[in-house]
Image (cartoon, rainbow, N blue to C red):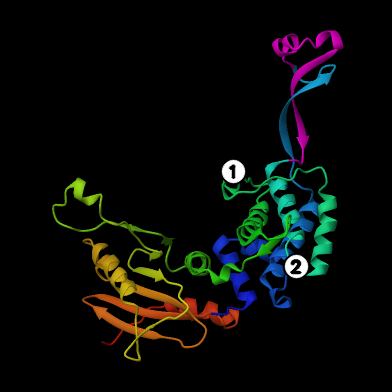
Amino acid sequence: MQIPIENIYFLLCYAWNKLDEKERVNVKPEDYTELLDLFAKVLINATKMLLKRGIDKNYIDHTEELAGVKGKVQISQTLKSNLLFKQRTICDFDDFSANIILNQILASTIYRLIRTKSLDKQLKSELVSLQRMLSGIDQIEITNALFKQVRLSRNNHFYGFVMNICQIIHESTFPSEEQGKFKFSDFTRDDSKMNQLFEAFIRNFYRIEQRKYKTVRKETIKWQFDNTDNESYQYLPQMETDITLENENEKIIIDAKFYRETMTLNYDKEKIKSANLYQLFSYLLNQQDSSLKTQNATGILVYPTIETDYNLNFKYNQHKIQIRTINLNSNWRNIKSRLKEIIELEIIAV
């Protein structure tokens, strides 16, 4: 499934909940044919914005041996090291510096991009210039765990978008056969990553773009077996919806599934993937309580497509069950319109 780069960029910005930052960065995805070049341009423009407004700084604690005194003297360590007769001390002090984790991740990502094969030469030149402007900031080894240490405030919230870009570049670049060089791996070819992106995109799209359903969330549903003891219950798989939309009177459960092929073939006839339908059916039956909205809840399976669109409608008791597709090869206006149309439920004649 070949999805246009500009649509991938939209999916990411919705999934990250960073639409405002996307507009401020001012990148035209249609100008690029390679995802690596797009990410590089986004990072370049975002970094220029940070430098223009002034990169974030903070106080950093140091303990060092110094000539003279600075901050708080560590008397016992100084005496043990016999430094006083040399007119030197060991001191604790803090320094207001840009050499903080946010900027270290940014500088290290720029360094990594510069050394990534197949990057556009002009973009590489721009990155080298930015690297010089970030001199004095340490290069560090980036890990996924490092991004969890990032703490943002109202004053530096734009770094959230920058860190999202840095993380996806980190996850998509790997050491190559040449020492000190990296190669880019297109994450859109990884079905597991695309499934996570597709799900997060749809969930945040509905959080941002509609007002009918006040609650948009993942929902944990408990199995409604009778008299199940705790020891047995712990072996049951957890049921968690991809997206639950809810207001006072209505409820929709959406299961978003990313597949290269929407349907399976059975004797040359297209069929819905049975496991997906069973899963959605289980959600609908087990979420029921005494309220009308749970008894009338709608279940929707949403798949991506770049060719054939499906609008399939079924009904079980009071539950509408729908199969819908989103054409990710379409222009963005059509995609937005289709997503809004999917949750505009109508009475189904069955």
Q: Quadrant of residue 125?
A: bottom right
Residue 343 in sight in this render: no
Query: Going from the N terminus, do you reach mark 2 or mark 1 first?
Result: 2
Residue that appears at 19% across and 50% down:
232
* Residue tagged 2: 119
Residue furthest to the bottom in view is 268
Residue that appears at 41% across and 80% down:
324
Residue that appears at 25% across and 52% down:
235
User: Answer yes or no: do the residues labelled 2 and 1 have beta carbons within 8 Å?
Assistant: no
Pinpoint residue 265: horizontal percent, then vertical percent.
Answer: 36, 86
Q: Nearer the viewer, residue 137 or 242?
A: 137
Q: Is residue 91 magenta?
A: yes
Q: Nearer the viewer, residue 8 or 188?
A: 188
Question: Disc 2 or disc 1, which is closer to the eye?
Answer: 2
Pinpoint residue 192: horizontal percent, then vertical percent.
Answer: 48, 66
- Residue 260 left/right relative to 290: right
Relative to 127, residue 298 above or below: below
Residue furthest to the left in view is 227
